[in-house]
Image (cartoon, helix red, strand yellow):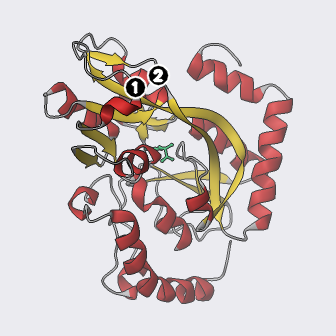
Amino acid sequence: MKNSKLLKVLSVAGMGILSVGMLAGCGGGQSANQAVAGEEAVASETPAASETPATSEGIEATETPASDNVIVMGTNAEFEPFEYRENGMDIVGFDVEIAEKIAEHLGKELVIEDMAFDTLIMALNSDKIDFIAAGMTATDERRTQVDFSEAYFQSQQMIIVKADNTSISTADDLVGKNVGVQLGTTGDLFVSGTEGIASVAQFPTGTQAVMDLKNGKLDAVVIDAEPAKKMTEGQSDLKLLEAPFVEEEYAIAIKKGDEELLTAINETLEEIKANGTYDEIYAKYFGTAE
Ligand code: ARG
């Protein structure tokens, strides 16, 4: 992973061609939605453009992850309680604390790059980041592009509707409805892949989807359980449906074949689960330890 500059340049040159195809694959024609959270969403024009230091808004971001004493986590800090900006500033959350432990295990300093969720895998595969910790569900489809650590969190998809909504109570009721999702997430894949949904609105962040729900532009938002709880907390005009669907597991994504980092991450997860650290972090963000 800590490859030489030369190797990096070579792999980036290859990406120029690759990224166009990958983009088409993950953008789903919604490229307008991608001009969001930091990062030049794609840099697909020329291979040279990809090599230009990212003008990321990630607060702790450095130009490249090239240095040997740092390890770069890629995330999308729009996903409380897993990763979010505290007072709009520092990126904190459950995933950040897990990542801190990984960095500690490696004896490196953690650097965080914040970017649009649907650009994370591309950033990983073009060496802009070393791993993804973003509440990312380990799906078979993603396994064709990245390797995943052991799972570190169980999750589900949930549905948010307006408090006065009476027509939606399960995922089946989404048929014929206007549904909002965060672009490129498993919620997006589920809704986009469901026959009969009237329209799927793909947003850069889940928060924006919930705004449109509040404004009456959408009938429902499909998003992961814990962020859904955060987004509806204290919102009397919103209701989180009790019926979770699609069980998922979050895992850390690393570049395919990066055995050394994979081992280090799995060792860290094992270690913190065994020594109580995981439970402590869990309790901090979710109240009681499982
Ligand atoms: N678990 C879902 C997925 O993997 C959503 C993750 C969104 N994460 C984020 N940091 N915005 O697609």
Residue 39: percent from left, percent from top: 35, 61
Q: Secondary structure at mark 1?
A: loop
* 45 relative to 154 in the view: left or right: left
The circle drawn on residue 243 is 2
Instruction: Give the camera-side residue of 225 and 40.
Output: 225
Instruction: Give the camera-side residue of 174 and 102.
Output: 174
Circles 2 and 1: CB atoms closer than 8 Å = yes
Compared to 14, does 23 lie above or below?
Answer: above
Instruction: Give the camera-side residue of 258 and 5.
Output: 258
Residue 9: percent from left, percent from top: 53, 86
Is residue 59 visible in the rendered image? The answer is yes
Q: Secondary structure at mark 2?
A: loop
Residue on which disc 1 sits: 170
Q: Which residue is found at the position 40% from the left and 19% from the top?
A: 241
Locate the N terminus by quadrant.
Answer: bottom right
* Dot 2 crowding, Cα within 10 Å, few <14, some 14–19, many 20+: few
Earlier along the polypeptide chain: callout 2 or callout 1?
Answer: 1
Locate the C terminus by quadrant.
Answer: top right
Quadrant of the rendered structure where residue 176 is? Answer: top left
Check disc 2 and give the amino acid type: Ala
Q: Which residue is found at the position 41% from the left and 27% from the top?
A: 228
Check disc 1 and give the amino acid type: Thr
Q: Is mark 1 within 8 Å of ligand 1?
A: no
Instruction: Give the camera-side residue of 275 and 225.
Output: 225
Residue 115: percent from left, percent from top: 40, 55
* 77 relative to 265 in the view: left or right: left
* Dot 1 crowding, Cα within 10 Å, few <14, some 14–19, many 20+: some
Mark 2 vs mark 1, CA separation in Å: 6 Å
Q: Which residue is found at the position 79% from the left and 54% from the top?
A: 264
Compared to 93, does 199 lie above or below?
Answer: below
* 218 relative to 156 in the view: left or right: left
Q: Which residue is found at the position 57% from the left and 33% from the top?
A: 155
